[in-house]
Amino acid sequence: MGKLPMICPISRMTERTMPGRRSFLATTAGLVLLPLRGFGRAVAYRPVILKGDYTRDSTHERQARARDEGCIGVVDFHFNSTGDPTVSGGEIYYQEGVTASRHFAEVMWRRFEAIGLPPHGNQPLRSTATNPRTIFINHYAMPAILLESLFLSNPEQAAWLHVGGHLGSLADAIAAGIRDEFPGGGTIGLSPGHAYKTSTPGDKGAKCREGDSEAEHTVALVGLVEQRLK
C-alpha cells in the first residue's frame, strides 16, 4: 500500500509561487490570493541574428530586418586589423548624433574594461562621423553600436582570443552590456560582420594571425551572446 498524502493541520499554511507575481496560501478552509511584493517577472530578451547586406552601398537588408523584427537595439560585431602587428586595443562606434547610441557604447565599454580589454588609443568611443566605413549603422532606426573588440592582426590579441574561455568571457561582457542598457528586455539585433552577406557570401573579413578569419569569429561570438540572452 502506498503512502498517504500528508494532511496539514488547519492552522498550518503553505506558500507556493504562481505565475504573474502572485502566490497562494493554501489552507483546509480555502485559497486566498495575495500579491507577492519584491518579486519581479523574469525579464525576457529575444535575440535576432541579422543576415544579408548591411554596408553603406548595399540595400540595407539587415537594417530593414531589425526594423521589421521590432528590435530595440542592435549590436554589430567586428574585429579590427591593420598592417602594423603592434597596433592593439578595442573601440566601439556609435551613431552620429544619437544620444542613446552613445550611451549604449559607454555602457558596453565599461563591460569591456571589466574583463581587461585595453582601448585602442586614448578614446575607445568613436562617432561614425570619424570613420566612413562605419556609417552603415546610422541606417538602423534604433540605437546601434559597432564593436571592434581587438586587433586580429596583433599576435598577442589574436592568441588571447583563441585561448579556451576567452571568447566566452567576451560574450559574457557583451550580453551584460545589453542587459545594462535594456534592463526591461526586448528584441535585440545581433549582426555578425562579414558573414551571411547576400552580395558577397564568401566574404571572410580580415585574416586572423592564428589562421582563421574575422567572419568565423563574429559568427562564433554572436552565437555565444545569443545563448546568453535566451
Image (cartoon, helix red, strand yellow):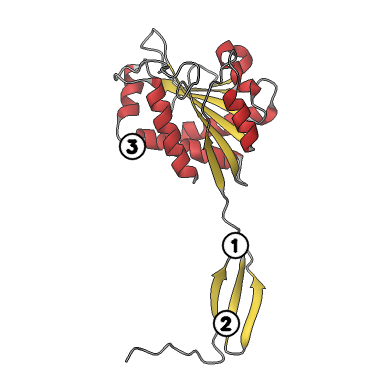
> Closer to the camera: disc 2 or disc 1?
2
Q: Label 3 vs label 2: CA separation?
A: 47 Å
Pick out the residue farthest to the top: 83
Q: Is residue 172 above or below residue 118?
A: below
Residue 199 spot, x, y in % from top left = 50, 16
Residue 95 sits in quarter: top right
> Closer to the camera: disc 3 or disc 2?
2
Residue 184 spot, x, y in % from top left = 62, 47
Disc 1 residue crowd, few under 14, some 14–19, many 20+, Cα 10 Å: few
Camera-side residue: 110 or 95?
A: 95
The residue singled out by tag 3 in the image is 165
Camera-side residue: 60 or 154?
A: 60
Residue 168 sits in quarter: top left
Residue drawn at x 31%, y 24% is: 159
**What type is the residue that disc 1 sits on?**
Phe
The residue singled out by tag 2 in the image is 26
One can see residue 84 in this view: yes
Q: Quadrant of the N terminus?
A: bottom left
Q: Is disc 3 in contact with disc 1, using a CB cutoff of under 8 Å? A: no
Residue drawn at x 61%, y 89% is: 29
SS under mark 1: loop
One can see residue 127 in this view: no
Q: Is residue 131 above or below residue 112?
A: above
Residue 112 left/right relative to 106: left
Where residue 39 is drawn, which disc sits there?
Answer: 1
Q: Is residue 221 above or below residue 58?
A: below
